[in-house]
Image (spheres, rainbow, N blue to C red):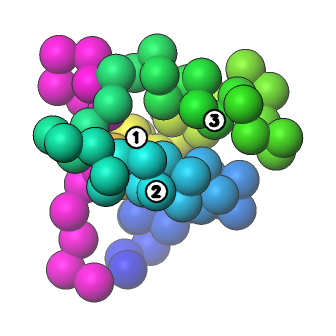
Amino acid sequence: MSWERRIPPFAEDALFVLDEVITRADDRSVPKADAEAILAADDRFTDADAEYALNVLQSRGHIYYVDERVYITPTDE
């Protein structure tokens, strides 16, 4: 993984939580509001933490949005 895509531990935790949900979804995505709620429901995240984690993941290229839906960026790994 290149240094540009490295993320802080809290964002790694958020990506793991989202990956478990998104990979089971029919279209491999969830609405952005649901992603925030999923993270906020986890004891490790407050509402603000969930929103910030999504921002970090999106800005570092780990997730992307299409029509307010969250997708995980495919990797070669």
Neighbourhood count class around disc 1 (C-alpha, 10 Å): few under 14, some 14–19, many 20 upward:
some
- Of 3 and 56, the residue lying toward us: 56
| Mark closest to the chain's N terminus, 2 or 1 | 2
Q: Is residue 71 visible?
A: no
- Of 62 and 45, the residue lying toward us: 45
Q: Mark 2 and 1 residues: CB-CB less than 8 Å, in contact?
A: no
Q: Provide the residue designation for mark 3.
A: 39
| Mark in front: 3 vs 2 | 2
Neighbourhood count class around disc 3 (C-alpha, 10 Å): few under 14, some 14–19, many 20 upward:
many
Residue 77 in percent (x, y) is at 28, 84
Which image quadrant is residue 69 in?
top left
Q: Secondary structure at mark 3?
A: helix
Q: Residue at x 39, y 39 (%)?
A: 58
| Mark in front: 3 vs 1 | 3
Q: Provide the residue designation for mark 2.
A: 20
Neighbourhood count class around disc 2 (C-alpha, 10 Å): few under 14, some 14–19, many 20 upward:
few
Q: Provide the residue designation for mark 1.
A: 59
